Amino acid sequence: MAAPPGSEVQAMFAEIAPRYDLLNRVLSFGIDRRWRETARRRLDLAPGQDLLDLCCGTGDLALQFARHGIRVLGADFTAPMLPLARAKAERRNIAARWVRADAQSLPFAAASFDAVTIAFGIRNVEDPQRALAECQRVLRPGGQLAVLEFFAVEGRLWGPLFRFYFRHLLPRLAWLVRAGRGGAYRYLPESVDGFARPDGFAQWMSAAGFEEVSDQPLSGGVARLLIGRTADAAATTARCTADAAATTARCTADAAAAEAAEDAKEGGP
Ligand SMILES: C[S@@+](CC[C@H](N)C(=O)[O-])C[C@H]1O[C@@H](n2cnc3c(N)ncnc32)[C@H](O)[C@@H]1O
């Protein structure tokens, strides 16, 4: 199952926006905070570096970075999420900027950010490969993309256990916390089942030009953290130099072969 059209996704997240944080804490038993902190540590950005947090929702991941002096821009296409993120940042006295934007068509110049993060968002994007291409475009050479996401949990014990939680307990818990009509949390397990498998998603990242793609299971694989890097300037220069040297060598060999053939013709019978 591909993600529903953007307008449906927006309507669904607009409906749960006011209770989104409470739901996250209750439904993940607070573990989502630890996953976000793992993402922050793995990216290991320095204060002053530029981070784009895509599908930022109410801004939890963005603020985790901003707290450590990273210059953060949070972007989401569901309008009601952004005032919640802004208010949270103000309450905590953390500097961050927020903008409404679609991950598939980013309003930023090429090479604008040192890192892009997407937490539990890419699965909801109608054309995730287009979003990955946009991430590649807006990242600087050597920049990092980190994707935190739920994928179908495999394994004979964990698989059925999590499917039971996702399909039966989670929608009921969501209903108890009064998350709209609970539809978003019926959609969650369906969207996880219908999304790419982790190795397939890693291949999408590679196809979009990300290198050194790593895949780290979190909490027994309930969530996963995939990180990739754009080619750095030195590697690109080295590759171009190697390509140029190979082309020169090939041309020299071709010219020598042509000359030898010409000589053979002239001196031939
Ligand atoms: C499950 S929430 C995750 C929010 C936040 N990253 C977090 O970890 O709590 C998914 C978010 O992705 C956003 N989203 C989905 N598709 C999007 C798109 N094409 N462009 C921008 N945001 C999108 C939704 O509006 C929603 O706020």
Image (cartoon, helix red, strand yellow):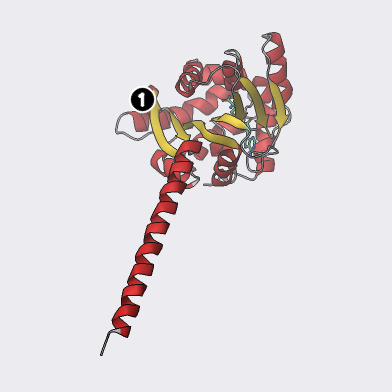
Could you tell whether 93 is left or right of 140 in the image? right
Q: Quadrant of residue 124?
A: top right
Q: How many marks?
A: 1
Observer able to see residue 258? yes
Residue drawn at x 50%, y 45% as measured from the top left = 208
Residue drawn at x 66%, y 12% as measured from the top left = 94
Ligand 1's image quarter is top right
Instruction: Describe the element under mark 1 as helix, strand or loop.
Output: helix
Q: Quadrant of residue 121?
A: top right
Using the image, determine if residue 266 lies above or below residue 109. below
Could you tell whether 104 is left or right of 260 in the image? right
Q: Position of residue 261 (x, y in %)?
A: 32, 77
Q: Residues within 10 Å of mark 1 (few under 14, many from 20)?
A: few
Picture quarter with the C terminus: bottom left
Q: Residue furthest bottom?
A: 269
Q: Position of residue 56 (x, y in %)?
A: 62, 27
Q: Quadrant of residue 85?
A: top right
Q: Residue furthest left?
A: 269
Closer to us: 102 or 257: 257
Residue drawn at x 64%, y 22% as measured from the top left = 72
Q: Is mark 1 within 8 Å of ligand 1?
A: no
Q: Position of residue 32 (x, y in %)?
A: 50, 20
Give the amino acid at mark 1. Answer: Gly
Residue drawn at x 36%, y 32% as measured from the top left = 160
Observer able to see residue 232? no
The residue that mark 1 highlights is 220
Closer to us: 22 or 165: 22
Using the image, determine if residue 222 lies above or below residue 139. above
Q: Position of residue 66 (x, y in %)?
A: 61, 17
